Image: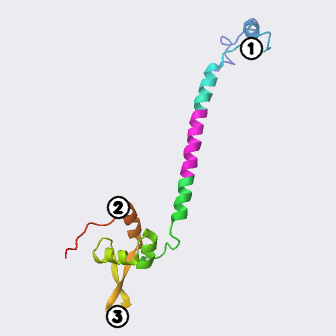
Amino acid sequence: MNPLTNPSLKQSDNEIAENVDLIDSQVNPATGYSSVDYHWFDDRFANLHKRLMALEAWLETFSRNVTEMNQEAPEHIDREYYSVPEFAELIGRSEYTVREYCRMERIHAEKCESGRGDAKSWKIPVGELARYRDHGLLPTTYLR
């Protein structure tokens, strides 16, 4: 039922005037404002404000992390392999150390068809860089 069209739910003019008088009687004469308690609103607003500040801090941290990840991303994503000198520079080791890692199967690598004479050079898959950074060297399998 619509309260506006139902005559039993409509307030009479006298009842409306009584409600207005109640509201007017709660007006603080010093300030001219009603003395309705809005503390519940302040508490809810403070809680929402805290949550908003926490969300903004998280968003800023997330944005900063994404920016750092984009700066660290390799420039040539379409490549399949790194050479030994490139991989050595990326991990901060010497070329000799990286060749030894390849020889002892401490990182995943394959021999190329190119090289000097019978000695073929190594090629290291692009995915191996992420695996090395996340998990380190593979366990030793080469025994002398």
Q: Which residue is label 1 attached to? A: 34
The residue carrying pointer 3 sits among few (fewer than 14), some (14 to 19) or many (20 or more) residues within 10 Å by Cα, namely few
Region of the chain picked out in magenta, as a range: 49-63
Q: Is residue 138 above or below residue 46?
A: below
Q: Nearer the viewer, residue 75 or 21?
A: 75
Q: Earlier in the sequence, mark 1 or mark 3?
A: 1
Kindly check if marks 3 and 2 are in contact, taking CB atoms under 8 A apart as contact.
no
Q: Is residue 51 above or below residue 36?
A: below
Q: Quadrant of residue 2?
A: top right
Q: Cα distance, mark 1 to mark 2?
A: 67 Å
Q: Which residue is label 3 attached to? A: 117
Horizontally, residue 112 falls left or right of residue 73, namely: left
Residue 136: horizontal and vertical position, in percent?
35, 63
Q: Residue furthest left?
A: 144
Q: Residue at x 34, y 94 (%)?
A: 117
Q: Which mark is residue 135?
A: 2
Predominant secondary structure, magenta span: helix
Q: Nearer the viewer, residue 141 or 12?
A: 141
Question: For the residue marked with disc 2, what is the amino acid?
Answer: His
Question: For the residue marked with disc 1, what is the amino acid?
Answer: Ser
Position of the C terminus by quadrant? bottom left
Examine the rendering and report whether any part of residue 83 can be seen: no
Question: For the residue marked with disc 3, what is the amino acid?
Answer: Gly
Q: Earlier in the sequence, mark 3 or mark 2?
A: 3
Residue 73: horizontal and vertical position, in percent?
51, 66
Q: Cα distance, mark 3 to mark 2?
A: 34 Å
Residue 80: horizontal and vertical position, in percent?
43, 76
